[in-house]
Image: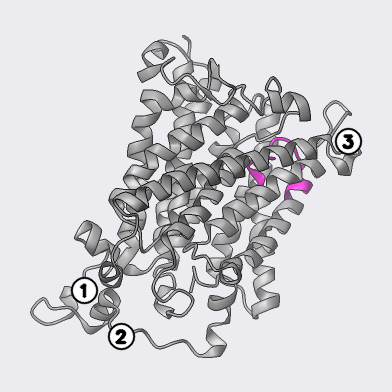
Amino acid sequence: MDLTAGHVWVMISAALVLLMTPGLAFFYGGMTRAKSALNMMMMSFIAVGLVGIVWVLWGYSMTGGEGIGQVFGNPFASFGMSGLIGTEDLIGAGYGATFAIITVALISGAIADRAKFGAWTIFVPIWVTAVYCPLAFMVWGGGLLSADGAVGGAVGEAIDFAGGTVVHISAGVAALVLAIILGKRQGFGKDPAQRPHNIPFVMLGAALLWFGWFGFNGGAAGSAEEAGLIWVNTMAAPAAAMVGWLMTERIRDGRPTSLGAASGIVAGLVAITPACANVSPVGAIGLGLVAGAVCALAVGLKYRLGFDDSLDVVAVHLVAGILGTLAIGFIMLPVDGEGGGLFYGGGADQLVAQIVAAAIAIALSAVMTAVIGLAIHKTIGFRISSDSEVSGVDLSEHAETAYEFGGLGVGGSFHPFAEQMFTQQKPAEPLPAQQKTTQDNVTEGVHS
């Protein structure tokens, strides 16, 4: 096999996408409390280890090849990838692994501060096997939702170029289900100590995610022309979403925030993911503005509906994933002057296909996540003890902390500030009303 420019680009893209998971670790780690930062980052890192193994052994086989009931591929067809050695298919297999890794890592943000690390390590390989791999096969591997599938053939093939349905909708639904199963954190909505402990980490994580997303969206480009459109859209949509989020903060709360800027970028990246190769740059800007504003408003849903999605995975990934998936039905560009979305006079067929695909992804992820999550929760338990939650999940699960404060005290004892941070025996004083509007409203609790 001769190494072509296309092969090299896929390999570079795979490396960019793999970098996104450590970027997510910084993004999520900065949004948690100091006493939970390492655990939060470890949940992303262990996803790399576990999914990497699953993907080589049977995960890749389940996303392509001969289908079983148009739902998933034969897990033993390329078991261990031994049959791919010496073929260019191995490059694509590596690229696909990075998508599976970050998908399950996204879920972890909803259960920050309160999940057992051991329970998470059981959940990850089972969820990837039972949810991600079948959905990837149904959409990209010639299964149920493809043009040749039973559903895709009947209502039309859904477009999901880089994973709005397979990645973000499935992860967002799973995050919601797990948040409900584990229940609310102690002090949810009341304890000011649940605010992010390191906003620079959050912004660094957002920057790494944006950088890696050019490989996430662009790695499967079929031509230079398509790659150019994807690149520009991947720049334009998150840029507009950041502006949309900050405008929403400014109008509602009186000031824009750095946390809002980072969150807006991610919302825009999520929204453009399924549509990156099928909308114009102007359409990408419009989609980004809508996604930024809507997701900024959606972070308050957990308070109104009563679930504790710690880092707003539902508001950003599920909401923006649905927006981007359905937007294709409205703003999809015509192909050779024909078809296109409703705004181009293409009719409602594509919108119907997008709705059906999103609904199936929601149903599959919700049911399977509930089964997996409840099974773990009712057996070994998914949630740490109350005492461990107070002392900090870093200490209880890993016997270490992100920050060493011993040098600030006398004789190696904790400085009073550190003692309060890691034991929470005395809650911090609430901010004055004029200083807390954005913390309590826009990013309401992730963020609070």
- Within 10 angstroms of label 3, few (less than 14), some, or many (20 or more) residues? many
Q: CA distance from mark 3 to mark 2?
A: 61 Å
Figure quadrant of residue 386: bottom left
Q: Is residue 208 magenta?
A: no
Camera-side residue: 423 or 246?
423
Mark 3 and mark 2 in contact? Answer it, CB < 8 Å: no
Q: Reading the chain from its start, which is encountered first: label 1 or label 3?
A: 3
* Image location (x, y in percent) of residue 72: 53, 25
Q: Residue at x 58, y 23 (%)?
A: 141
Near-viewer residue (306 or 424)? 306
Q: Which residues are magenta?
A: 271-284
Q: Residues within 10 Å of mark 2 (few under 14, many from 20)?
A: few
Look at 44% across and 57% down and name the residue there.
181
In the rendered view, would you say 306 is above or below 399?
A: below
- Residue 146 in the image: above or below residue 348: above
Q: Is residue 395 left or right of residue 258?
A: left
* Residue 279 within the magenta-colored segment of the rendering: yes
- Report the residue marked by disc 2: 426
Q: Position of residue 315 (x, y in %)?
A: 59, 59
Q: Secondary structure at mark 2?
A: loop
Tell me which residue sits at (57%, 21%) in the image. 69
Residue underneath mark 3: 346
The residue at 21%/73% (across/down) is 405
Q: Amino acid at mark 3?
A: Gly
Measured along the vertical axis of the image, is residue 419 above or below residue 82? below
First along the sequence among labels 3 and 2: 3
Is residue 370 toward the left or the right of residue 390 in the image?
right
